[in-house]
Image (spheres, grey):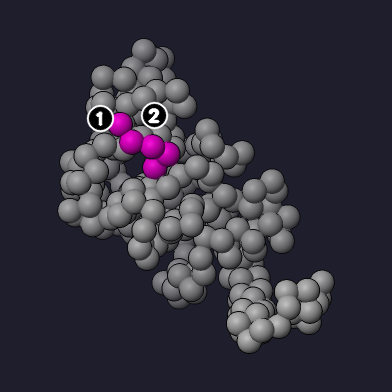
Amino acid sequence: MSLSPAVLSALKRFSSCEIADALLKMGQKPWGGYIADIELWSPKYCEGDTRIIGPAFTVKMVETSDTTSPSPNQHFVDASEEGSVIVISAPPLVKNAVWGGLMSARAKYKGVQGVVIDGRVRDLNEHRNMKFPVFARSHSILPQNAFVRPSEIQVPIKLSTSPITVNPGDIIVADLDGVVCIPIQYVNEVIASCEKHVAIDDQCMKALQEGHGVKETFAKYRGK
């Protein structure tokens, strides 16, 4: 299932926080699609208005000592798709990076929206000079190939920081507040929920800025 430009445009109106709220209201427990502990590293560290939205292009990494897991037929960045968000799952305890400046150069040329890494990134200035969006768990000075290798692409991946599975084609939204994964089948329902509850919160914000109390404002507009 692919999304129309109109649906993606509708999603762009809502933050990762608003989308996670919607998923929680829809019963997506425990964390409403939130991929925890992933932060924005480029174009700036935890600053600015960078937002990426697109279907997940998934990559599973394994340690180089793993000789039984499969290997992809081509480099995962070469295989990535225009408009996608590359999502990388790395072994949780490794200290090396799994993404560097050369990868951003190729991904940007291919029209990839950005990368979300359950792992580490290096070459920070190179990504920032390219203004390529990079979200990662941490950073490193160590290279990928001495420690881990790509194993599978476009398969369901589990992440070390979140009790969710990211499937190829799930919609990834990443911004200053964090990263959220929307299962593809729930996108239209998420948009409808966001439209309803963001309008309510806009009313709450206006009332609070005009001096009304939190309790009375929530009772009036949120019904609690």
Q: How many marks?
A: 2
Which residue matches tag 2?
A: 61
In the image, residue 159 lies in the stretch drawn in magenta: no
Front residue (pair 108, 17): 17
Query: Which element carries disc 1, helix, strand or loop?
Result: loop
Q: Is residue 167 left or right of residue 150?
A: right
Q: Main secondary structure of the magenta part?
A: strand
Front residue (pair 27, 187): 27
Q: Is residue 94 left or right of residue 36?
A: left
Q: Is residue 120 in view?
A: yes
Toward the front, the furthest residue is 211
Residue in the picture at 39% in, 62% down = 51
Which residue matches tag 1?
A: 141
Q: Quadrant of residue 218?
A: bottom right
Q: Which residues are magenta?
A: 136-140
Q: Give the amino acid type for the residue marked by disc 1 in the picture.
A: Ile
